[in-house]
Amino acid sequence: MHGKNVYFPIGIDRNGLPVELYTEKKHGIRMRETDRKEFLDLCRTALDDLEEEMIIIMRSLGISGDFEHYYRTDSAEYRALTQSTFINLWKNDMVYLANRPNNYDWVSGTTIADAEIVYEDRAARLVHMRFGCDDTRIIVASTRPELLCACRAIIVNPDDTRYHNMVGKTVTVPITGAKVPVITHHSAREEFGSGAVMVCSYGDQNDVALFRELELKEIVAIGMDGRMTDVAGAYAGLRPKQAREKIIGDLESGGFVESIQEITHRTPVSERSKNPIEIIPMEEYYIKQKGAVGRLKESGKGIKFHPEMHRQILSNWLDSISIDWPVSRRRYYGTEIPVWYCVKCAEPYVPEPGRYYRPWNEKCPAESCAKCGSAEFEGEERTFDTWMDSSISPLYISRYGSDEEFFAATYPASVRPQAKDIVRTWLYYTMLRCDQITGVMPWSEAWVMGYGLDERGAKMSKSKGNAIDPLPVIERLGADTFRFWSASEINHGHDFRCNEQKIEATKKFLSKLWNVSRFISGIPRAESDDVTNTDRWMLGELDMLVSECRRGYAEYNFFIPAIAIREFTWNLFAAHYIEMVKIRASGEGFSDNERDSARYTLHKVLSTILVLAAPIVPFITEHLWQAIYSDQSIHKQGMAETQNTPRNDVTGIITGFNSAVWNEKKSRGLSLKDSISMEMPEKLEPFRKDLVAMHHLD
């Protein structure tokens, strides 16, 4: 509507852990106990059903994307591009394989990146334990006593005077009997627990950093099956939570417990599965990102955020990045890592980019190993982190690598629309990957919305059972009702609460718009070069509405035009202006010029309202436009522009006077058609003729 050539692709994200968890739950199976091909087929079928529902919802809502050519992130073409970008990064020394402590979700059986972790406050017990040796005693507080077997040191803050005489000494770990040193480190907080902290491999990310800094030898206490390993002794084979309860009991019976506090602990959990994560050493593929942080901070300044406040989410995340991005996952339904390994010497073979590879299920393209000459290879079984796929969406839709002319015309994109909870994943990883590949930011603007909350203020999600299924609401109330509620309820980028009563209440405005349009449709259209004072006043207010709506649309803030259109249409145009001019529009007691001026203005205002509202409520505006004005779609009209009508700032006086007359008639028991004597403010003299006719003033 602004005269621009718009490319609006639709994509369906069909990768990732949620797909696999959904399939496992639906069929009552476990991924690792099911044939891989069979499991992938089940995932694909489940996705087809979910995809069909998504497309129906999007079409029903009137989204105007290209549904004839929508793309899927699990298509061979999409996955081939993901793999190609990885291969190119590999050749440019931006990828490496390393064994490091990683966040691990033992329930889903895979590594997860820092960006996929959220923190929840959960109940925990802070156990104050007696560590000692001969005459040396120290109280150590921890919420993870099951990791005593992995304890390698005790740290205290160098400024904590309670422990100055302990530094440099060795103490005995309860239960295990191991001897560990007491050393100082600034990360120990004097105010937490006893101020003395055990350093284990690995209770949290601080432990990871300390093991690296202090060059401690790690002990792997928790395995990939999510159970305590043999180093845990009598607690081997137990889940960490089970081991924790049992070891607390043993500590108490052994006289090692000073006290136990019930606390609320900030616990890292998997954003997807909500399982508490463990940190275990694993070999994974990493993409270098630490060295790009400074560049991304600078490039990110050129991206305009709508609203600006959400830039801080990106800024905070960039400041927190301390390790490279682990991109390999031990799951099935995802884009495979295109690598084979020589069976004899383990040398990796990475193929040429261009097609989709499935190493676990196909022969290596190489005839022999470049290092040892062996002809026997083993395919990689791991897949990529799903954000490896999602992060190249701007490249895929612009046909990167396959159509240079189209790519030049469409990349970078103009705007990325998304929710705030994936700023540190989808938005950030897209910036990182597109910068690595093209050296150019993927878009110039980012439109970031808040969370949809339920009536109690909790974030809506299907897993919680508090999400509203939009399709039945759309079928019952109409897409325009749903859309107008969304626009008028969601204040730019802020969280918003949902309930069907509020959505249904929005229908009242659409009924008002319908009734106003039906009334005006019965009035002949006319042209007028000389409008009256009343009409000039209304056209001046209309210019204000146009300016406000255009400002909101320019900021992708649909709350602004939705509220402005509703208030103008309902409380000014319908309630005051139409009442003032409907007698004149009929020609009764007025000249032909005055009549035509009213008719022109009524249609000018209504047609402008319809055009302004069309992006928000496309169906009702399309119907009314074609019924009243033209058989050409309203969505092919130019966006309304101001007419530079001089504004007469008397709106408050007019509406105040009208309300005063109506209230006076009501208090006297008069009908609106009865005559009445009222003193008119001097500023309303230019509007006297319309006001006299409207109120039947004596």
Image (spheres, rainbow, N blue to C red):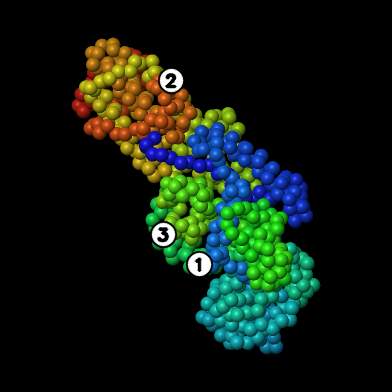
Q: Taking 308 as reference, is 2 above or below it? A: above
Dot 2 or dot 3, earlier in sequence? 3
> SS for tag 1?
helix
Q: Could you tell whether 152 is left or right of 621 in the image?
A: right
Question: Mark 2: few, some, or many residues within 10 Å (few <14, many ≥20)?
Answer: few
Residue corresponding to mark 2: 627
Q: State the image quarter where residue 299 is shown.
A: bottom left
Label 2 – label 3 distance at C-alpha: 49 Å
Mark seen at residue 620: none
* Farthest-out residue, top: 588
> SS for tag 3?
helix
* Farthest-out residue, right: 234
The front one of 377 and 158 is: 377
- Evaluate if marks 1 and 3 touch, with contact meaning CB atoms under 8 Å apart: no
Label 1 – label 3 distance at C-alpha: 15 Å
Q: State the image quarter where residue 285 is shown.
A: bottom right
Residue corresponding to mark 1: 290
Mark seen at residue 299: 3
Asked if residue 121 shows in the view, the reply is no
Q: Amino acid at mark 1?
A: Lys
Give the residue drawn at x 58%, y 29%: 476
Dot 1 or dot 3, earlier in sequence? 1
The front one of 425 and 251 is: 425
Give the residue drawn at x 75%, y 49%: 38
- Evaluate if marks 1 and 2 touch, with contact meaning CB atoms under 8 Å apart: no
